[in-house]
Structures are given as C-alpha cells and as structure tokens.
Image (tube, grey):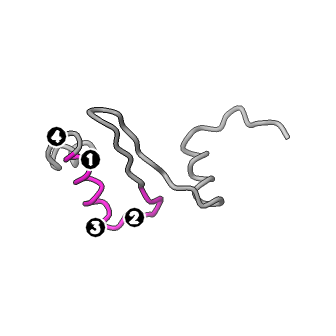
C-alpha cells in the first residue's frame, strides 16, 4: 500500500487518537522540559481546560488571561 502524499498532521493525529487509542502530548523545552497530555475530547471539560492553562501559565511565567486571549 502506498503512503498518502496529502495527509496533514491534524488528520493523522485525529485518526491515531480515534482508532488506535493514542493521546496528544504537548511538549516544550523552554524555559525547561514540560509535557502535558491533552485529551482529544469535544468539548474539553472546563476543569481539564483550567488545569492545562494553569500548567502552561505557571511553566511559561505568564498569567492565564494572556493564554485565554490566544485561544
């Protein structure tokens, strides 16, 4: 079977999460290493969203409002 030439990253992630039980992981090295799992749910539960934003804000040294403006 030939590999698809027009597959974008979002479609690949969506298929792997949906059909093969993979999870999305956000990772950064700035200012230090951090990994955050993000559930592929629609919508993300408010408590989960709050926790993800808190983790990112603490790690990056910004406030949550700055993150919310970028969404």
* Disc 2 packing (10 Å; few <14; some 14–19; many ≥20): few
* Disc 1 packing (10 Å; few <14; some 14–19; many ≥20): some
SS state under label 2: loop
Q: Which residue lies under the disc numbered 2?
A: 43
Q: Earlier in the sequence, mark 2 or mark 4?
A: 2
Residue drawn at (38%, 51%) of the image: 36
* Left or right side of 1 for 19: left
User: In which quarter of the view is residue 22 placed?
Assistant: bottom right
Whole-number angstrom distance, CA of label 2 to CA of label 4: 26 Å
**Is the C-beta separation of discs 2 and 4 under 8 Å?**
no
Residue 47 disc label: 3
SS state under label 1: helix
Which of the two discs, 3 and 4, sits closer to the camera?
4
Q: Earlier in the sequence, mark 3 or mark 4?
A: 3
Q: Which residue lies under the disc numbered 4?
A: 61
Residue range (magenta): 38-58
Q: Where does residue 37 sit, x and y in percent of width and height?
A: 42, 54
Q: Is residue 48 magenta?
A: yes
């Amino acid at each position: 079977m030939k590999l698809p030439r027009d597959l974008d990253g979002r479609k690949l992630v969506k298929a792997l999460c949906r059909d093969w039980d993979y999870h999305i992981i956000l990772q950064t090295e700035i200012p230090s290493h951090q990994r955050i799992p993000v559930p592929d749910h629609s919508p993300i539960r408010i408590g989960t969203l709050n926790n993800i934003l808190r983790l990112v804000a603490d790690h990056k040294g910004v406030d949550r409002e700055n993150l919310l403006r970028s969404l």
